[in-house]
Amino acid sequence: MRHLALLALGISLIGLASATSADTITGRVVGVSDGDTITVLDGSNQPHKVRLAGIDAPEKAQAFGQASKQHLANHVFGRQVTLECSKRDKYRREICTVYVYGQDQNLAQIEAGLAWWYRQYAHEQEPSLRMQYELAEHEAQIAQRGLWRDPNPTPPWEWRYERKTRRIGGTPF
């Protein structure tokens, strides 16, 4: 029984460590690919391709895609940023929350109505961030900011799926 308790404690501590561990990177934004992807050069001039955590912005060819990219560029391009990174995605981009002068730029994209809160990955966010992002999206919808001016905006994950389906000639199943 004692061994079982120690094992449970060890697993809990490992889970806690992994849940709170995040890499912090500081650097200058040298590229903005779209409304949720940037390139940052760190202090050693190493490039970091960064996907903004917790959001999904319209693709460049989508309605509001260019506006989303421009809004992000206006807030981060050429600026010193702090990245709180949790993992890498399948494209090897670092998944990060981006801060400029302590302000969460991922959240700013949602507040402007130029990105969706990416609910699919909500479980990877701290509860307080989940609440902030969800509330920001709700407020942007009510105020009809950005993409919420459209009565029925297409989320980027649906847009990508539709394009993929058309490309392969039907359903991908």
Image (cartoon, helix red, strand yellow):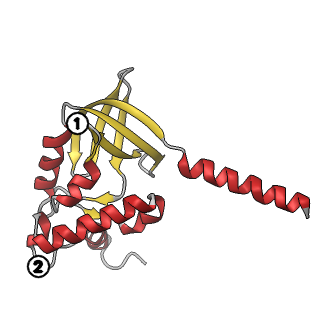
Q: Which residue is mark 1?
A: 31
For label 1, the crowd category at 10 Å Cα-Cα, with few meaning under 14, some 14 to 19 and many 20 or more, is some
Residue ID at (42%, 63%): 121
Image location (x, y in percent) of residue 141: 17, 72
User: In terms of secondary structure, where does tag 1 sit?
Assistant: strand
Identify the amino acid type marked 2: Pro
Identify the amino acid type marked 1: Gly
Look at the image and tell me whether residue 155 can be seen: no
Query: Image height check: is 153 above or below 7?
Result: below
Residue ID at (12%, 61%): 64
Image location (x, y in percent) of residue 56: 29, 60
- 173 or 43, which is in the foreground? 43
Look at the image and tell me whether residue 5 can be seen: yes
- 105 or 160, which is in the foreground? 105
Mark count: 2
Q: Which residue is mark 2?
A: 151
Query: Image height check: is 56 above or below 82?
Result: below
Which numbered disc, 1 or 2, marks the residue that appears first in the sequence? Answer: 1
Residue 62: which quarter of the image? bottom left
Residue 99: which quarter of the image? top left
Query: Image height check: is 24 above or below 123?
Result: above
Image location (x, y in percent) of residue 127: 44, 62
26 vs 75, left or right, is right
Query: Image height check: is 127 above or below 142?
Result: above
